[in-house]
Image (cartoon, grey):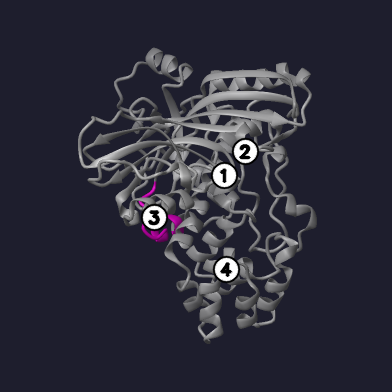
Amino acid sequence: MVMDDPACDSGPRILPDPRLQATVTDEQGIGGRFRVHDDEFLVDELPLFEPSGKGEHIYIRVQKEGISHRDMIGRLCRAFDLPESAIGYAGMKDRRAVTQQTVSVHTDRKNLPDLESIGLQVLWADRHDHKLRKGQLEGNRFSIRIRDVDPLDAPRAWTVLNAIALGGLPNAYMSQRFGYRLNNHRLGAAWLESRWSDLLDEWLGTRGSPFPSSESGVRTDYDNGRYQQCINDSSREWWAERAALQALAEGASPARACSAVPSVIRSLWIDAAQAAIFNRLLSCRMRAGTMEHLVEGDIAWNHGRGRWFRIEGSDMTAEDRARALQAIEVSPTGPLPGRRMPTPGKQIDELERQAAIEAGIDWDKMIEGGGSRRGGRRPLRVPVTNHGLDAGTDQRGNYIRVAFELPKGAYATGVLAEIMGANAVEERGWLSTSQG
């Protein structure tokens, strides 16, 4: 099903919505709300391996609720009196959830400090011979209750959940990748094209993407050149913005002010530009009915091995390929443009370049000037396994609960968007009172 996808707004600097513009089925979303209560969004990290029982690192299985990833790492550092480099983790988990995950601590101490007192419940602990690295997980299991729904809509929800379990979940980047204003890709495009004034105006001013009304004053100060006042009035969430504002207050040019932006933030912008191209390509493939099929020129993804391969020259027979596609063992891939991105065949290459044009991102600058981006390929779909659903009424009201497992890097909100509808999963209530 194709969703509304309006053309670019007036003006050459306004780019289209970067999110996925298609759905797997024609079923109308059931609506509702999720994450109404933190203890109704459960995440259980699936480990890639078990600790060996000996070594210099303690592996600790922790459960947390209402604690951000950064906060958890800080609490562990203080509890063990160690630097952040001594802490390892496989993935970052949501704050507004009850999550279980494994962390590693490089320490020779025999006993654990009291982690319960800092909000971390210890489920088990064991030793291992190396640090837990980012990405060293199989995936995550989710159990999510959707509220403000009619339990009688459970069959409709099951139809959608079962459809994506059979054919795969579109592996789209969700709104988290694009920031609370859905404009990180616009900032990335401006950075790639060296449009420094445009970048600052979009990021800091009022003449760009929608923003919360609480930011009207500080953004108006920027528009009027009152940079020091802007710094004084900005919230602590504007720590990165203040770096650019401080440079402007000291008389720096727009280019130098943009260079003052922390590199981690600039990386997020480039990542979002990549993601906008990928989502546009995925939307195109879904419209054409080829998300689940390999076509001439495709580069395929082997889900079991976690790597790409070219279908031309592979030893897979047509029958093997058909079976692997149906079992979601193999899938087509989409582009993550960068210096070392594998280039597909001509037909697919042209399609991907067209997706970049439609996304408003300069393909050549993305390939050549995307900073340190090596580039790569991302599967267009991922398997959804061990799925289940139930519904009913409890002391909090009506609910439909969905449970499923996803591989690492996939978004649970992608599943919810298919079931509830894309607008229902947006957590930007400020839009109703936004300015700009």
At label 3, the amino acid type is Arg
Q: Nearer the viewer, residue 386 or 316?
A: 386
The residue that disc 2 covers is 38
* Residue behind mark 1: 66
**Quarter of the picture holding the C terminus:** bottom right
> Which disc is residue 199 wearing?
4
Asked if residue 287 shows in the view, the reply is: no
Pinpoint residue 137: horizontal percent, then vertical percent. 38, 34
The percent coordinates of residue 315 (x first, y second) are: 29, 20
Q: Is residue 113 left or right of residue 381?
A: left
Relative to the observer, which residue lies in front, 354 or 57?
57
Q: Position of residue 330 (x, y in %)?
A: 41, 24
Q: Is residue 88 above or below residue 284?
A: below
Tag on residue 78? 3
Q: Is residue 125 visible?
A: yes
Which residue is found at the position 51% from the left and 43% from the top?
278
Cβ atoms under marks 1 and 2 closer than 8 Å: yes
Please provide the residue range marked out in magenta: 365-375
Q: Residue at x 21, y 42 (%)?
A: 56
- The tag earlier along the polypeptide, 3 or 4, is 3
Cα–Cα gap, marks 2 and 3: 25 Å
Q: Is residue 99 left or right of residue 73?
A: right
Per the image, label 4 sits on a secondary structure element best described as helix
The alpha-carbon separation of the residues under discs 1 and 2 comes to 7 Å
Q: CA distance from mark 3 to mark 1?
A: 19 Å
- Where residue 259 sits, quadrant-wise, is bottom left
Q: Residues within 10 Å of mark 3 (few under 14, many from 20)?
A: few
